[in-house]
Each structure stands twice: as C-alpha cells, then as structure tokens.
Image (cartoon, rainbow, N blue to C red):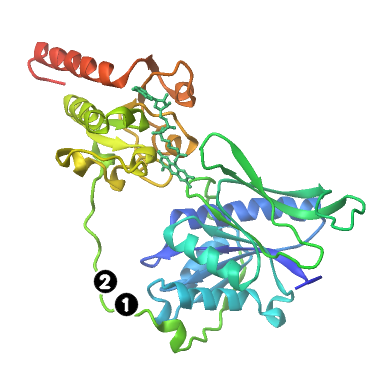
C-alpha cells in the first residue's frame, strides 16, 4: 500500500488462564506513556488500542482500559480459548484492517510481547499486514528522523515523521541497535511493529476511574485456520527451579577449555554453598561435548537471564561469564554477586560486589575448599 492512513498504537495484550500476563500490563502502560507524549508533540489525539483474545476477554479488556488503553478489542470465542497461531493471526490482522470501524487503513504502531506466543504472532501479523518487525526490544520512543540514503532519486534528505525508535541489545549483548520501520518510496510499512521483552517497562497502577470503548472483534475462521486442534492439555511438570535457592553458581563460556571439568567445578561449588547450578545462554548454545555424567546439567532450564530464569539469591557466583545485558537481566537483583573471570575488564565487573581476576578452573576448587573448611569449623553449618 502507498499513501495509506495510519493511526493509533495497538498492543497485543496476551492472557493466560483468564489473566493478563505481566508483560501485557507493562506494554499497555508504556503505550499510554508513549501516546501521551506523541499526542502532545504532534498535537494529535491518537489512541491506545489493546487487543485481547480468549477467556474473560471483556474483563481483561476493561483491565487494559484501567491501565491506560482507550479502546479494547476483544474476542472471547471457543476457537480462541487456547492460543493457536493461525486463528489468532486471522482475527488480529482482520481487526487491524477494519477501515470502516477504525477509520484508517492500518494501525500506526503495533506492540507484541516477546513471549513464545507473542513472538510467533508478531511475525505472522506483520506478514499479513505487509510490514516490518523489530524483535526483542526494550526501549521505545517516537520522534521524527531525517533520512538521506532512502531517496533513490538522489533528491533532498527527507524527514519521516512520528517514527517509533525501537531499541534492542544486539546479538552480542553489549551493543545497542535502533531499528526503524520506514516507508519506502513506493511502499508504506505500517504498522511499525515490535516485540517487547518482558520486564522492560513498569506497569502503571490501574486507574479505576478511566473509561474507554470495548469492541467485539469479528471472528471468521474456516477449516484451513483450524487445522491445528487441541485435543488434550497437560501442564508440564515444573523443571529446574533456581529461584528457591539462597545461592546460585552459574557457569559461562569460560568453561570452554574443558566443559566437563568446568561444569563439575560449578556443581561442586554450588553444593558447597547449598545451592544449585545455573548457566549463561552461552553454555546452552555452545554444543559442548561433555561427559554423560554431567550432561544433565547442560539444560536450557538452567539458563539465567532475559530468556531464562530471573533469580534474586543471597549469593550469586558467576564463573567465566562476561555479563551480557540479557544475562544481567536475570541476576542483577542478587544480593551479593561474585564474578570470576580471567579478563581484567568485563561488563559483569560493573555490577559485581567482588570481582576476582582468576582462572575458574583454579579458583573454583580453592573457593569450594575454603567454604568446606569454614563449614567444618562451624560444625557443618553454612
Ligand atoms: C534475544 C537474545 C536473548 C538472550 N538471552 C540470554 C539469556 O537469557 N541469558 C544469557 O546468559 N544470555 C542470553 N543471550 C546471549 C547473550 O547475549 C550472550 O551471548 C551470553 O550471555 C554470553 O554468555 P557468556 O557470558 O557465557 O559468554 P562470553 O560472552 O563468551 O563470556 C565468557 C567469559 O569467560 C571469560 N573466561 C574465559 N576463560 C575463562 C576461565 N578459564 N576462567 C574464568 N573466566 C574465563 C571470558 O573472559 C569472558 O568474559 C541472549 C541473546 C539474545 C540475542
């Protein structure tokens, strides 16, 4: 599409078991803050539109309004009771293109949560709406941007208005990228879409006095949309729960020289601290060949960070972990952080209470022995 009409910030407010998940509340609140500033800066009156699917959609839509939405699009339909990608995509994408109801061709912006379902849905809805998507963002702002190289004709620099600046840590975890979704000379890219990392924004306190519109979304699904059927649901057993320990020892890619030995150093130290073993994602994705006796420890469930577990133990020991932003998110609320690293300077140093420049293979066993000695003196106490 070219020269379409675009308005409003839409938010997919994901729910589970009839409740909004925390990131949905965070996103609706942030959308309110962004659009309040947008409306002030551009002397506009554009809305925050929450989209809610599934059981109790009406109540959840009302909750979104209390959190800052102006309009809640809801669909509480038997086929949407459990999230399935195809029906959800069809319903959400159709609602976003109801020109006669919305008064515009497509939304200006669309936020999705960077959850398993939200990531999937963001990609398919962006595909249907024929636009771009920035994934895993954790900072957003709206302002004009002047672009020179987009002008194919070699003309003057052009100012693109009201561009959502979508910031995310890059794949290294140490640099930031700002992603812009900008119209081309012969094609508009709207809505400007992104997925948002849980925990990036603060949920507002609900305002019980706020009012808004609740609108039913049309649900028109055919056999093709319903090819995936849910015949039975069973909750998975909770796997490794690192949140219940007072101490966690996590190992990172610093174990790469001898991963089996490195894991054992971590496990032994965790036992001496009466805690459990955590991993950086670096270890989860490294495809290390390890001895079968320690294979059980190379388990994604032990990953700490943005896409793993969030922990706040009394003591967190990081062995050979550099401190990428995604890792930091899951552990920097720990009360006391000890990092062991061969490098003099790494990002994790900045948020460690004690930073030891040492080889984990040497320092880990020494620390374990010292702790055991101390425990012996205390009559076996911690
Ligand atoms: C969308 C996305 C989500 C992500 N989610 C997560 C997440 O949830 N959790 C997470 O952890 N990461 C996550 N990451 C990956 C993250 O960006 C980093 O790549 C990862 O955390 C790096 O792991 P690391 O610190 O073990 O490895 P590295 O960055 O390679 O660091 C290894 C460290 O070990 C040190 N070292 C080397 N040898 C030794 C030794 N013998 N003794 C002591 N120190 C030594 C090095 O100096 C270095 O500092 C994510 C990335 C993306 C793109």
- 362 shown above or below 265: above
Ligand 1, by image quadrant, is top left
Please rate how many residues cluster around mark 1, counting C-alpha atoms within 10 Å: few if below 14, some from 14 to 19, many from 20: few
Q: CA distance from mark 1 to mark 2?
A: 7 Å
Residue 230: which disc?
A: 1
Q: Is residue 62 visible?
A: no
The quadrant where residue 317 appears: top left
Question: Compared to 113, does 219 lie above or below?
Answer: below
Disc 1 + disc 2, Cβ < 8 Å = yes
Tell me the element at label 1: loop
Task: Say left or right for 266 vs 225.
Answer: left
- What residue is shown with label 2? 233
Residue at coordinates 30% horizontally, 21% vertically from top-left? 360
| Residue 190 point in image, percent of width and height | 70, 65
Q: Where residue 272 sits in the image (x, y, percent)?
A: 17, 24
Image quarter in which the C terminus is found: top left
Outermost residue to the bottom: 223
Residue plotted at (24% across, 46% down): 240
Q: Residue 295: horizontal and vertical position, in percent?
A: 20, 42
Q: Nearer the viewer, residue 115 or 54?
A: 115
Residue occupying image coordinates x 44% and y 63%? 117
Q: Quadrant of residue 275?
A: top left
Q: Which residue is at a point 77% across and 62% down the rendered structure image?
A: 184
Locate the N terminus by quadrant.
bottom right
């Amino acid at each position: 599409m070219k020269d379409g009409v675009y308005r409003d910030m839409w938010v997919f407010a994901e729910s589970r078991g009839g409740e909004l998940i925390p990131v949905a509340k965070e996103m609706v609140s942030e959308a309110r803050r962004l659009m309040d500033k947008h409306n002030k800066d551009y002397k506009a009156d554009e809305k925050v539109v929450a989209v809610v699917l599934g059981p109790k959609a009406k109540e959840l839509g009302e909750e979104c309004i209390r959190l800052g939405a102006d309009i809640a699009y809801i669909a509480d339909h038997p086929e949407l009771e459990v999230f399935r990608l195809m029906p959800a995509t069809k319903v959400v994408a159709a609602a976003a293109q109801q020109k006669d109801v919305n008064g515009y061709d497509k939304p200006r912006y669309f936020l999705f949560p960077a959850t398993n379902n939200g990531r999937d849905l963001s990609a398919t809805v962006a595909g249907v709406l024929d636009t771009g998507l920035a994934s895993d963002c954790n900072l957003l702002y709206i302002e004009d941007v002047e672009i020179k190289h987009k002008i194919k004709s070699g003309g003057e620099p052009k100012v693109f208005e009201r561009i959502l600046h979508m910031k995310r840590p890059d794949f290294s975890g140490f640099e930031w990228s700002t992603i812009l979704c900008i119209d081309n000379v012969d094609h508009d890219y709207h809505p400007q879409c992104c997925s948002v990392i849980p925990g990036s924004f603060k949920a507002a306190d609900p305002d019980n006095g706020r009012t808004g519109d609740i609108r039913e979304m049309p649900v028109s699904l055919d056999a093709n949309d319903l090819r995936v059927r849910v015949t039975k649901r069973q909750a998975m057993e909770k796997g490794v729960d690192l949140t219940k320990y007072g101490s966690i020892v996590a190992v990172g890619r610093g174990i790469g020289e001898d991963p089996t030995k490195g894991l054992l150093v971590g496990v032994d130290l965790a036992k001496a601290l009466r805690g459990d073993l955590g991993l950086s994602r670096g270890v989860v994705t490294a495809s290390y060949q390890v001895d079968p006796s320690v294979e059980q420890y190379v388990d994604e469930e032990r990953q700490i960070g943005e896409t793993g577990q969030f922990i706040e133990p009394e003591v967190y020991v990081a062995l050979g972990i550099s401190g990428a932003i995604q890792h930091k998110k899951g552990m920097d609320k720990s009360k006391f952080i000890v990092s062991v690293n061969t490098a003099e300077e790494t990002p994790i140093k900045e948020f460690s209470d004690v930073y030891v420049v040492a080889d984990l293979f040497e320092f880990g066993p020494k620390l374990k022995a010292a702790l055991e000695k101390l425990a012996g003196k205390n009559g076996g106490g911690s």
